[in-house]
Amino acid sequence: MRKYTFIIPLFLLLFSFESSAQSGSKGTYSFLTLPNSARVAGMGSNFLAIKDNDINLALNNPSLISAEMHNNLGFSFVDYYSDIKYGYATYGRSFNKLGNFVGTMQFIDYGKFSYADETGERQGDFQAGEYAMNIGWGRALDSNFFIGANIKGIFSNYESYGSFGLAVDVAGTYFNSASRFTASFILSNIGRQLKTYNGYNEPLPFEIKAGISKGMEHIPLTFSVLFTNLQKWDLTYTSSLNQETDPTTGEVVEGNTGIADFGDKLMRHIVIGAELRPFKVIRLRIGYNYLRRKEMIVKSRPSTVGWSWGVGVKVYKFEIAYSRSAYHLTPSFNFFTVTTNLDSFFNTME
């Protein structure tokens, strides 16, 4: 079993020298950080550390990949801003000697754009989109510890400008079935551009994150707490639209200081979520992303920015999940995910 553990340090040596801490819109291939599955979106929109053999969690946390995902098939689709749409298709396969694998094809379609000259006369249309082919691998070290890694080939195309890159995620998970406790640590998007758009090499959205989850003993309820962007302490950003000014002097009023400032910066790293299973075939989800609320809220109309919710239902041989996540005052996004196991339809041969 030890002969496979060389993969993680090898990936780190190959790619870590090109990675740097990124936040906001810096860098390229930012579509890799978008929440994809409805379950993830409904519980805070980042990743999850819940080990229950859900293939849709493997894309962000490869250490959750397990033999129980064999022949599982999943599809996810997100109706994003304007004409933008994104999603993925994922499939799991296990091999006795090699471990467990999940292949995922991600895409984001930015829609159709129009060429126009300096006078505004249209000269035609063009498309823009980005894609990532992801191969995930996971294996148990023993009954409690699990490791995993993703390797991604990334292609981006904007009109006549194209780019290609390579990235990896590496992760480890501790799972205690008796106490229903899971903890994960992840290094995501370690990599670099191999072909740039215009000769300038841009960094990838590297992130260090960790998460825990705890299932209740007598209630079918699971709590999730995530710690994101651990590579950078100060994630504060204040929009001029939300700055307070002194009505007498017109000067900008300073924000939090001391303990309040520390608490604000700490909470920007934390995402909380919960999942309730009132019946065997139904799951109800809710999440709160403090960073998103602080960055996107309009103080005069706070609304539900930063909150998300979702539901999962088992229908026949399918798991169907739907979530909505509030980013701003504009209508919330719709997340759809469908999962099934092909063995339930066919008798496969090993």
Image (tube, rainbow, N blue to C red):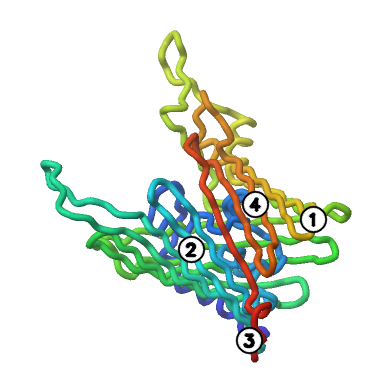
- Sequence-first disc among 1 and 3: 3
Circles 3 and 2, Cβ within 8 Å, touching? The answer is no
Quarter where residue 68 is shown: bottom right
Kind of element beneath mark 2: strand
Circles 4 and 1, Cβ within 8 Å, touching? The answer is no
Identify the residue position indicated by label 4 in the image: 226
Q: Between residues 12 and 92, which one lies in front from this camera angle?
A: 92
**Residue 319: % across, % down:** 66, 64
**Residue 192: % across, % down:** 39, 66
Kind of element beneath mark 1: strand
Identify the residue position indicated by label 1 in the image: 279
Q: How many residues crowd around disc 1 within 10 Å: few (fewer than 14), some, or many (20 or more)?
A: few
Quarter where residue 100 is shown: bottom right
Q: Amino acid at mark 2?
A: Asn
Furthest toward the front, the residue is: 316
Q: Between residues 135 and 220, which one lies in front from this camera angle?
A: 220
Identify the residue position indicated by label 2 in the image: 189
In-image side of 218 versus 170 (left or right): right
Identify the residue position indicated by label 3 in the image: 95
Quarter where residue 86 is shown: bottom left
**Who's the residue at 53% across and 26% down the image?**
301
In-image side of 168 versus 219 (left or right): left
- Sequence-first disc among 4 and 1: 4
**Who's the residue at 54% across and 71% down the image?**
90
What's the CA distance linking mark 2 and mark 4?
18 Å
Kind of element beneath mark 4: strand
**Residue 162: % across, % down:** 28, 65
What's the CA distance linking mark 4 and mark 1?
26 Å
